Every structure is written in structure tokens, then in C-alpha cells.
Amino acid sequence: MSKNDHLSDDELSLFREAVQGSKKLQQDTIIHQPSKNFSDLQQQRKSLKEGKNEEFFFSDEFVPLLSEDGPIRYARDDVSKYEVKRLRRGVYVPDVFLDMHGMKQDEAKRELGSMIAYCLKENISCASVMHGIGKHILKQKVPLWLAQHPDVMAFHQAPLEFGGAGAILVLLSIPDR
């Protein structure tokens, strides 16, 4: 109906009889939330998962059984000792270097978790962690933290060209995508 269409008197009186006794409704304002796209939900889940990877909790109380003779080294039970030997010889060349010189323990833990998450995201299998020698605090803690992470396959003291006694080469398992 347009504004030019008018109701006749009979139609108007018929309408008033039909609605007689009814109450006027008070209109509430309802704001409809836009529905989220499926891709938005996937991005949120992915960002949450990445955030969890970066905030991997390294315990200071857990002490894994590492060999104390010779340079620091470690390999998971399902990893061949030959991989550790290849790390020692420098066959694996690190694509990422993390320099921890001057960091405090909590900063170093956070950066180590972020580096591992970055390597997994970018499909990088070998990284170098330069902890330095200094007071031996990070030199002692970094191997303990690395042994706790489920994606660390093996690590070994770096060869001289990658930092020697002040660095560790880390071999990471890259999940199939």
C-alpha cells in the first residue's frame, strides 16, 4: 500500500473492531550478531594452537637423564644415535640461530619455546641455540629444557663453526602436513 491509498470508513471501522481490546506492544531493540565464517573459526583455533606452542612450559624441577661425560648430547629413544653423530660432525646446518647472551632464565625459556614453535611452523629441522658460557646457568638449563620438549628429536654441543661449547645444535621433528 502506498500513502495515496486510503481506507474507506467501513474498512477503518472494521479494523478498529478487530483490534479492540488489544495492547500496544513495546518494541525492544534487538541487535543481531553477524554469524562467523568457518574460516574465521579456523584462524582462531590456529592462533590458539600457535600460542600454546610458543608458551610451552619448561619445568625447572624436571631433570632428564643426560650423559655427563663429554660434550652435552641427547637423543629421544626413537631416534638413532647416528643422528647425534651427524649433529656433532656438523652435517646438519642450522637455519635458525637463537642468541641467548644476556637473557635471564624466564626470558630464555620464553624465547626457546618461541624458536621451536617458529621452526615447526616454517618446517625448519635444525636450529642453533647460543647460550654462551658465562656463569654456566643457561649452559646447564638449556639442555634440560630442550629434553622436555616433545618435538626435539636430538641435540648436541655445536661444532666450532656454529658456536662450539657456547652453543647447542637442535634437531626437530617436523610433523607431516
Image (tube, rainbow, N blue to C red):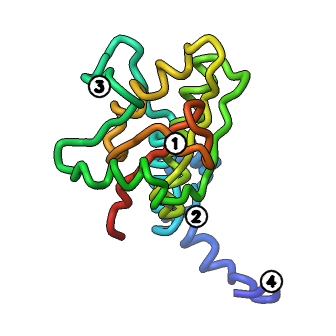
Q: Which residue is mark 4?
A: 3
Residue type highlighted by circle 4: Lys
Q: Which residue is mark 3?
A: 66
Residue drawn where x is 36% and y is 37% of the image: 149
Q: CA distance from mark 2 to mark 1?
A: 92 Å
Q: CA distance from mark 4 to mark 1?
A: 86 Å
Q: Which residue is mark 2?
A: 16
Task: Please determine whether, in this image, residue 147 is positioned above or below residue 133.
Answer: below
Q: Which residue is mark 1?
A: 158
Q: Nearer the viewer, mark 1 or mark 3?
A: 1
Asked if disc 4 and disc 2 are in contact, CB closer than 8 Å, the reply is no
What secondary structure is marked by label 2? helix
What secondary structure is marked by label 4? loop
Q: Quadrant of the C terminus?
A: bottom left
Residue type highlighted by circle 1: Ala
Q: CA distance from mark 4 to mark 2?
A: 19 Å
Precedes in sequence: disc 1 or disc 3: 3
What secondary structure is marked by label 1? loop
Local packing at callout 3 (Cα closer than 10 Å; few below 14, some 14-19, many 20+) is: few
Precedes in sequence: disc 4 or disc 3: 4
Precedes in sequence: disc 2 or disc 1: 2
Q: Nearer the viewer, mark 4 or mark 3?
A: 3
Residue drawn where x is 48% and y is 64% of the image: 123
Asked if disc 2 and disc 1 are in contact, CB closer than 8 Å, the reply is no
Precedes in sequence: disc 4 or disc 1: 4
Residue type highlighted by circle 3: Leu
Residue drawn where x is 35% and y is 55% of the image: 173
Residue 139's spot in the image, x, y percent?
53, 22
Residue 126's spot in the image, x, y percent?
48, 55
Task: Please determine whether, in this image, residue 6 is positioned above or below residue 153.
Answer: below
